[in-house]
Image (tube, coloured by chain):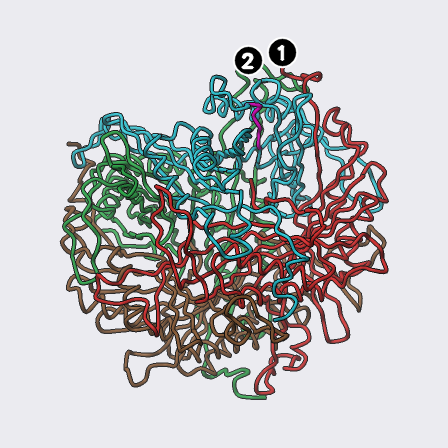
Chain colours: A red, B brown, C green, D cyan
Amino acid sequence: MTVHSRPAPAVVLGQNQYGKAECHVVRITRNGATHHIKDLSVSVALSGDLEDVHLSGSNANCLPTDTTKNTVYAFAKKHGIESAEQFGILLARHFVTSQGPIKRARIRVEEYAWDRIAGGVEGGGGAGEANGSVASGHSFVRSGQETRLAQVAFDGERWQIVSGLKDLVVLNSTNSEFWGYVKDEYTTLEEAYDRVLASEVSARWRFGWSGDPHREPAWESTYRRVRADMLQAFAETYSRSLQQTLYEMGSRVISRNDEIDEVRFSLPNKHHFLVDLEPFGLENDTADAAVYHAADRPYGLIEATVLREGAEAGIPPDLTNL
Amino acid sequence: MTVHSRPAPAVVLGQNQYGKAECHVVRITRNGATHHIKDLSVSVALSGDLEDVHLSGSNANCLPTDTTKNTVYAFAKKHGIESAEQFGILLARHFVTSQGPIKRARIRVEEYAWDRIAGGVEGGGGAGEANGSVASGHSFVRSGQETRLAQVAFDGERWQIVSGLKDLVVLNSTNSEFWGYVKDEYTTLEEAYDRVLASEVSARWRFGWSGDPHREPAWESTYRRVRADMLQAFAETYSRSLQQTLYEMGSRVISRNDEIDEVRFSLPNKHHFLVDLEPFGLENDTADAAVYHAADRPYGLIEATVLREGAEAGIPPDLTNL
Amino acid sequence: MTVHSRPAPAVVLGQNQYGKAECHVVRITRNGATHHIKDLSVSVALSGDLEDVHLSGSNANCLPTDTTKNTVYAFAKKHGIESAEQFGILLARHFVTSQGPIKRARIRVEEYAWDRIAGGVEGGGGAGEANGSVASGHSFVRSGQETRLAQVAFDGERWQIVSGLKDLVVLNSTNSEFWGYVKDEYTTLEEAYDRVLASEVSARWRFGWSGDPHREPAWESTYRRVRADMLQAFAETYSRSLQQTLYEMGSRVISRNDEIDEVRFSLPNKHHFLVDLEPFGLENDTADAAVYHAADRPYGLIEATVLREGAEAGIPPDLTNL
Amino acid sequence: MTVHSRPAPAVVLGQNQYGKAECHVVRITRNGATHHIKDLSVSVALSGDLEDVHLSGSNANCLPTDTTKNTVYAFAKKHGIESAEQFGILLARHFVTSQGPIKRARIRVEEYAWDRIAGGVEGGGGAGEANGSVASGHSFVRSGQETRLAQVAFDGERWQIVSGLKDLVVLNSTNSEFWGYVKDEYTTLEEAYDRVLASEVSARWRFGWSGDPHREPAWESTYRRVRADMLQAFAETYSRSLQQTLYEMGSRVISRNDEIDEVRFSLPNKHHFLVDLEPFGLENDTADAAVYHAADRPYGLIEATVLREGAEAGIPPDLTNL
């Protein structure tokens, strides 16, 4: 038996968490022939008195990840899914208050949006028992744009709610410049006075909500408003850098949504390069049109937090993986 | 020199093709302050007198893939991108007619759709020189639903145009049954009289068009109509199997679109399993709601071609990779 | 009820197939403390008398995809998994011979390879009951290089067996040229006399085997030999084009493996561009080193079939998706 | 001009960083006919006096991301790539010391490993000028197992070096149990006394190195040792939970590698479920073999830090995305 096999004096356990990840739960709520759909991927992470699970092999304090999965599905039926945030709150409270050793729960949700399929244009249908008007009540197409995100953390006393989105791809075909920057010995970039600005928005916003049930934010309408604010700020900003556009987006969110204290963005600069068509006797960037090569990698990556004055940052700087 | 190095008598070259794949071309067309965007990934595949390129190392007949890429970008500027199909036709004709050794060209296109970002709700804007109304002319958000597809093949005489889409996720929350099937010794599935039916539609449709410029189909409006037909047939069909739904979708496309002779679908059955909540004292599938586990793999895969009577199938059976 | 809802006279059903896709089956075979692992993703596609399933909603001829899944797992236990090909043969024969309406079965397999984890270097172990030598019998790390492929098709009489691989990334840092090609008005590429040649090999090879049980190929050893032949031909070929390298790889496979009549490759040209470092006062391509930008898209795509003389091509030209 | 457009008093800029991400640089180093390859994806993130870039649109302090990209390629040629960590150190020091406004640099690297292609077994070669022995000097196949990671952070004074890996898939086919856990009203899991334990290892380890050039760790050999330690600890641990296995892996790394103060793991529990074959008259888990369904989602996710006693944790708890 060598010293490395169980070097108890020298090694300690640090932060740890566990749970079931990516439980894909779909709830159909039926109001007669009109159905509603909620489509969520839920990930549970629990922390607490779990030293023994790691060190001695005793699972006496370990609620199995399988049980956390079952709880997600049972709660979806029992309590419904009012919103991603509210569902996360129910789950986090349950795990922390029902299990002594569990001191902290973090629930992450991805939500996929669905639109209704429009009814037949000619009063149609006719296949089987269904017809156009019934169809619109139970037929859906995934909207497929951004993925909505929510994270609920609860330690028995304090709540931290962070909402967000990812995969929202935006583009301005003008009103973007980039010049006046530092030039060093490795700089070859030419200044741009009219360029395409495109990004895939990844954003997280933190609510100031302390857990007071009488002041719970309206999660659904806030989501719609924040999303619209970000899009409009992106569209309306005359940009000298993606950093400036980012700040305008964050500033708009903070100043128009009192519930939100902080927003963080991770914005890849999805480069659109003007193709050099001169070798083919063509001028590219003319008054009527321009053609770009949309590049994959590398890409600029612009990340920043925008805060309500006086608020402390709570969203970690690295949304991307290490 | 060993026998295996160039066993000329025993080995022959079969079908071959080459070209640049996934040229990501974005064209901004400007009508004053109102801009329009076309966003395509274009792949070129050329065939012809290319034996020497493979056998002797002579590239005398080889138009470099780099040149095919340049041609894509130059044509986008020079001729515009009216539609994915029309752009593919221009490219295919160019390669076959301008290069003696090139006898056949196949152009594949993926197209990504964009919506305009709506202007500020409060007459807003104000950042920089832009304002709400200008913004709507040059600001876009990727619609993110399905990916549009087009394939153009030309051999100097005949044209084959296949359009399509993928990634369109649909779901009916009722009006789907599955029962009365074969039971063998490996069958454990229980019959279902009301289930969720969901799929991610991958479809290809072939036009009957022979190349007559006076009878060229209206590619854009046909795409919109076929897409709507498929969605409505999916929504309106009371389904006893995904096969039946597929057939109704195909039948709708063929019977309502005279330009189209054939349509093929690859429809994964995205299983939504009712979760057994009985161990928790809950009834799941009640009048007001039900909760499902949305599974990833394995999935049923239903594939079929639907044809106009008298038409010969031209779309290969395997849309998926070998 | 409008004419489009069931236009029976004008629309017909074409080729169709169905089954469960991507059944991820892992079999552990135990020889005392020495375990062996087979890790397969199996996809079943059945064809036959299935008109009614599509047209009338009768499932009387439909073996559920759930049953095909059960069969995969049951056969893995009952018959073992000697090789991907042999397992596919067992399944295909079962479906076609046991189900009257099923006339044709196609089984596709992806196989993931595992290596044993080497025992402790210091005679170590010591945690729990295990020690180094026991560990090597039941501990595995996924090798992660290529994915092995097999496709078995059976129509009750004839067999077609196609094996293959994908995701095998290779690179030659010299012995590759590209010059002497066609120049047209869109050509800007400069000739290259010493370049990097890299690709991600996707290959399929078809066996001549007719089903005679006494002449069944040795699937495992053939796989290893074909893989080695391709790699060595890639390494040893002084290349004037990727087409030439492809042909040498195919030629090597055909001439050294009598069981194989045909091989098809889909070889992306993974471009490595010499970075222009002159603006920084650096010469890039010197005797001791060179630095490249490895680009993602677009990429050249070179595809071809190489055949034994007299053999008819059976592998479809398009390994990639439409 | 409305109040939301620039609410300066209420909104402040928080942490921010920017740079070019995923510069894919390949360096070929030539020792005569024997070539060596380094294949890295490098991401730069810079922080400092960048308020104006966000607030006023002045880029006077902004070194373009394009320049950071150029620097990566130029440094790869000029200084070589000794290791991912050492290359990151060169870059981080350069950005912080050469640019006044840049106060902190973080360099992330993904490294892809390559093996040499073995020479021809029959003394072969013969195609072109190459032969077997030359081939082995310039021909490579991507090893494809784990992806190596490195992160270097420098603020002008202190260094933080975190190395790691991801995508390393491991499996023990026995010596794993899970029982004695908490049972609540949502628990249905049955206890397991012999199960498959599989994971895809994602690990990060932090070095204690303070920047002293005379005590710089041997990055390459440490990487190989840590990797071997983790694999062996995984193989040799008789496991009562994945948590316990994780702790043994971390403990082994800390106790055997003096340079390392902390290691964090994110270990998905890749569930392998014993398939119920009783309905088919088969016993599954017999002495000679067992068949499992390898599931994708949901999965257990076990995450923890293991520390050298007295060390403070520096690796953020969330390796996964929010």
Residue at image location 24% in from the left, 37% down from the top: C285
Disc 2 target residue: C122
Q: Please state the horizontal and vertical placement of residue A200, each as a whole percent of the image.
A: 52, 57
Q: Please state the horizontal and vertical placement of residue B246, each as a whole percent of the image.
A: 53, 70
Residue at image location 64% in from the left, 82% down from the top: A131
Tell me whether circle 1 and circle 2 mark residues in contact (CB < 8 Å).
Answer: yes
Q: Please state the horizontal and vertical placement of residue B145, each as a whole percent of the image.
A: 53, 66
Residue at image location 38% in from the left, 30% down from the top: D81
Residue B100 in which image quadrant? bottom left
Q: Please state the horizontal and vertical placement of residue C13, each as a whole percent of the image.
A: 46, 73
Quarter placement of the N terminus of chain B = top left
Give the main secondary structure, helix, strand or loop, of the magenta stretch.
Answer: strand
Mark 1 secondary-structure assignment: loop
What amino acid is found at the position of numbered circle 1 in the picture? Thr
What amino acid is found at the position of numbered circle 2 in the picture? Glu
Chain assignment, label 2: C
Q: Is residue C211 visible?
A: yes
The correct choice, above or below, for B158 with respect to D53 in the image is below
Residue D27 in which image quadrant? top left
Disc 1 target residue: A2
Bounds of the magenta segment: D204-209
